[in-house]
Image (spheres, coloured by chain):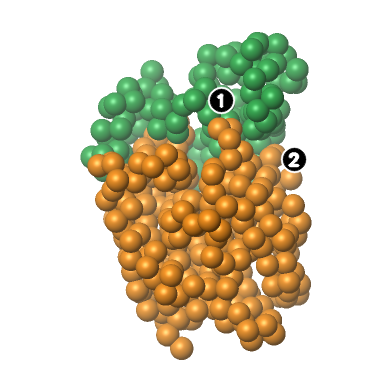
């Protein structure tokens, strides 16, 4: 039986990927950020999953305005790092898990979550930056990845509640997969940031901290935060935080918070990071 | 009945909703084309000629040529699509964000180092 053991949340700022790729992680600007992931990299080595279900958003890379799926699951055997306008990141090919991905798609659709099935997709910084933060720069990623893309670019994204419930449906799907696999679910994006308009640069550390507390201890409360609160309090792009609720929904009601890190700024963004473990 | 848009009153902020998607479809799809190296090179060689291949409004084309990102957003552009333009120019998200706030990149970077803009505070006036 497949089993979800832990969840990870992390921001996926593109400049972090550039800092890693250009060898700038020890520079004064970046070093404090990467120190916050030292524990996480060791933990990943000691708790290597077979598969990570990686919840992220595509940033006008695989999906243009021609087709805008609210939830899309990658069922391919592999996913290439995308050229986002300055050439693909020099990171390994992302290997998928088509059997588990198709099983999840079939299961959650029958639980009333109408996922879009994607059999060909390049993956952008939203997916590859979290892998780099958690795994460093290996020759090959040490586990299979099932990309789960959530639309948070075109308004409205799915509600936090819907994301949370999708996480629960994914948990039920994984529990009925009859291979013996260890699975983690990662939620990415956020925290507070606004990249557009005269209000660009919004950061709200209090909101972010309250969100981390609620997500860990009172996920039902976190799931109830309306879109307008994210936009107003955490900036227009802070709404990416709904994706963390998919991860939280896939875990036990009670979890152990193993690691927490917050850092301002990474370019335009407040970075937040959690590792949550199921205790049973 | 019109859709409720509680976000319409947030200063300095344009939410990329269905109305903006309709307005900006061709502008954003032009941006998307810059993900291909060959298209980036053709655009850089003659921006106006490349833009004229797209059924965009004259106002949208002028905003692109002027790199007026606030103007492009008002005309239906979305920042993740517009990012393909500043990536083609070799510029960062922080460069573009500073430009949109009317601050110098140095002032903007310092604001971020100091903890960012308060969500309650006023946006910068457009330069």
Q: Marks 1/2: CA distance?
A: 22 Å
**At 31% from the left edge and 58% from the top edge, which residue is drawn?**
A36
Number of labels in the image equals 2
Query: Front-most of A224 and A81?
Result: A81
How crowded pointer 2 is (Cα within 10 Å; few <14, some 14-19, many 20+) is rated as few
Which disc is residue B88 wearing? 1
Image coordinates of residue B34 in percent, x first then y, are: 64, 28
Q: Chain of mark 1?
A: B
Q: Chain of mark 2?
A: A
**At 39% from the left edge and 49% from the top edge, which residue is drawn?**
A192
Query: Front-most of A28 and A172?
Result: A28
Kindly tell me whether residue A39 is visible in this rendering.
yes
Mark 1 or 2, closer to the camera? 1
Image coordinates of residue A147 in percent, x first then y, are: 62, 59
Image coordinates of residue B104 in percent, x first then y, are: 32, 22
Q: Which chain is orange?
A: A
Left or right of A142 on screen, residue B59 = right
Which disc is residue A278 wearing? none
Q: Which chain is green?
A: B
Left or right of A247 on screen, residue A37 = left
Q: Is residue A59 above or below residue A53?
A: above
Element assignment for label 2: loop
**At 49% from the left edge and 57% from the top edge, which residue is drawn?**
A138
Q: Is residue A58 above or below residue A210?
A: above
Dividing the image into 4 quarters, which one contains the N terminus of chain A? bottom right
Image coordinates of residue A203 in percent, x first then y, are: 34, 45
Kindly tell me whether residue A219 is visible in this rendering.
no
Q: Which residue is mark 2?
A: A66
Query: Front-most of A257 and A132?
Result: A132
């Amino acid at each position: 039986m497949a089993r979800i053991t832990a969840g990870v949340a992390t921001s996926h700022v593109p400049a972090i990927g550039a800092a890693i790729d250009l060898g700038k992680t020890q520079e004064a600007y970046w070093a404090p950020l990467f120190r916050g992931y030292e524990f996480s990299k060791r933990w990943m080595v000691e708790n290597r999953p077979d598969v990570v279900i990686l919840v992220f958003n595509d940033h006008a890379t695989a999906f243009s305005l021609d087709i805008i799926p609210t939830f899309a699951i990658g069922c391919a055997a592999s996913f290439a790092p995308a050229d986002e306008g300055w050439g693909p990141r020099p990171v390994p090919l992302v290997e998928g898990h088509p059997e588990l991905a198709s099983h999840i798609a079939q299961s959650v659709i029958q639980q009333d979550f109408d996922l879009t099935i994607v059999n060909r997709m390049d993956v952008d910084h939203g997916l590859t930056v979290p892998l780099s933060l958690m795994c460093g720069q290996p020759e090959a990623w040490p586990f299979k990845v099932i990309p789960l893309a959530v639309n948070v670019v075109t308004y409205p994204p799915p509600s936090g509640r819907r994301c949370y419930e999708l996480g629960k449906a994914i948990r039920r799907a994984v529990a009925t997969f009859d291979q013996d696999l260890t699975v983690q679910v990662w939620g990415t994006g956020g925290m507070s940031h606004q990249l557009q308009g005269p209000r660009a640069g919004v950061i709200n550390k209090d909101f972010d901290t309250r969100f981390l507390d609620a997500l860990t201890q009172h996920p039902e409360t976190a799931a109830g935060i309306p879109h307008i609160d994210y936009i107003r309090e955490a900036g227009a792009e802070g709404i990416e935080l709904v994706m963390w609720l998919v991860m939280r929904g896939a875990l036990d009601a009670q979890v152990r918070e193993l690691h927490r890190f917050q850092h301002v700024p990474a370019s335009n963004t407040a970075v937040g990071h959690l590792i949550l473990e199921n205790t049973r | 009945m019109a859709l409720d848009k509680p976000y319409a009153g947030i200063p300095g902020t344009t939410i990329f909703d269905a109305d903006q998607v309709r307005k900006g479809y061709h502008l954003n799809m032009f941006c998307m084309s810059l993900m291909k190296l060959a298209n980036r090179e053709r655009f850089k060689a003659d921006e106006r000629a490349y833009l004229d291949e797209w059924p965009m409004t004259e106002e949208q084309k002028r905003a692109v040529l002027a790199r007026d990102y606030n103007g492009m957003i008002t005309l239906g552009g979305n920042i993740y699509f517009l990012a393909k333009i500043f990536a083609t120019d070799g510029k960062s998200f922080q460069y573009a964000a500073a430009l949109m706030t009317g601050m110098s990149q140095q002032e903007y970077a310092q604001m971020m180092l100091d903890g960012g803009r308060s969500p309650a505070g006023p946006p910068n006036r457009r330069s």
